[in-house]
Image (cartoon, rainbow, N blue to C red):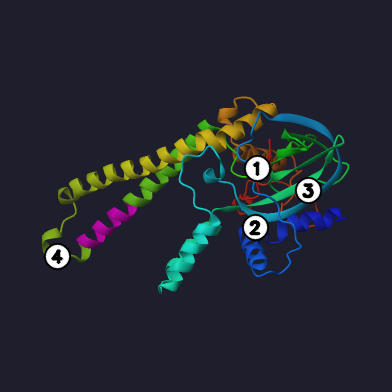
Amino acid sequence: MISFEKKQRCSRFVEPEKLADLRTKQEIELMNGRPWTRQLPPPPVLPPYGPLEKISGRLEAFSYESFREYFDVKAYRTSTLPTISDGQRAGAAAAAIAVGSPGVGAVIMAESESSNDTAEYVQGIINGRAFRGWVGITRLQEGDDVEMVAEWQHDHYEVYAITLPKERIVSIIPKCDMGHISHALWRIKNMLMLMVIMMFLFIGSLVLKNSFGDEEYVGFGMAYLFPSLAMFGGSIIISGLIAFFACRSCAPTRCKLAEEIFRLLGMKNASKVNLNKITKKREQRLMDEGKWHDPGDKSKPACPSGKFIYSGESWFYY
């Protein structure tokens, strides 16, 4: 049995293994007739096949393993986006390397790895029934009183969120941290940031051209008004389309599942919930009350954080 202190360090301070790499190694070993004894977890079941339910009880057994796995829109059966499997991506990378383009191959594989999230595959027993599934970082142990959002599947509960109700902490399946309205507002914010960056670069290039270019461009003024307006319009269209298609793909997948989880946890206005904002507010309140400690302090229990360095852990205050 892993001790409580060691469990914290494994969850937060040890780099999780990339599950796609392990599956590739498994395939290679089996193809070459060599034994493979390690049991790898299955991919996440997204979305659930039926309605979710909330379960309350005490953990009679609990274990976890940390991995990096893919949880974004293409992992959902209901997604309409074209799917590229890890095998297809690896094949494309190998082909690129074979024809003398190792840089292209590296980019292809890096794209696959960068879209993965750190998560824990948890297993255990609650109320005499087995459960398993993918959630964010946890610090759970046998004997904890918890609430779960899960779906019963024949012989076990498939888990999508686990909470410590006394501390209002939830470990949730990655990418399900916002309702669709909050997600749209977040996308709009990113769209505006992209517009500002594009306009800054464009105007900066005009200033450099005006300063060091030909004489006919000397005098920064009306000569650049039309190009600047055209660039502004183009940046609106480009960033707007990016935000629109991202929202259209996330709303019926990630956001829909998130809202179902939020409602079962008793959170109001599920479509407007943003767990990142709730966590930041809770951290500030703890600071004001003198109860906050640095999430990186190994001598104290691990806790969620709104700091950017911990943003990929998929556990929050709620």
**In the drawing, what numbered circle is on residue 214?**
4
- Is 117 on the left or on the right of 80, as rendered? right
Q: Secondary structure at mark 1?
A: loop
- Residue 110 in view here: no
Do callouts 2 and 3 mark residues in contact (Cβ within 8 Å)?
Answer: no
- Residue at which label 2 appears: 19
* Front: mark 4 or 3: 3
Q: Provide residue 252's location: percent of width, then percent of height.
A: 52, 33
42 to 99, vertically: above or below: above
x, y percent for residue 25: 64, 65
What's the distance in space between the residues labelled 1 and 3, CA to CA? 15 Å
Numbered disc 3: secondary structure: loop
Look at 85% across and 53% down and name the residue there: 4
Q: Earlier in the sequence, mark 1 or mark 3?
A: 3
Q: Earlier in the sequence, mark 2 or mark 4?
A: 2
- What is the C-alpha distance between the residues marked 2 and 4? 56 Å
Which numbered mark, 2 or 4, is in the foreground of this view?
2
Q: Which mark is residue 173?
A: 1
Label 1: how many Cα within 10 Å (few below 14, some 14–19, many 20+): many
Query: Residues in magenta?
Result: 200-210
Q: Which residue is mark 3?
A: 139
Q: Identify the image quadrant of the N terminus.
A: bottom right
Q: Residue at x 50, y 39 (%)?
A: 79
Name the kind of residue labelled 1 in the image: Ile
Kind of residue indicated by mark 2: Leu
Query: On the rendered structure, is 69 left or right of 194?
Result: right
Q: Residue at x 76, y 43 (%)?
A: 291
x then y, percent, for residue 207: 25, 58
Query: What amino acid is found at the position of numbered circle 3 in the picture?
Result: Arg
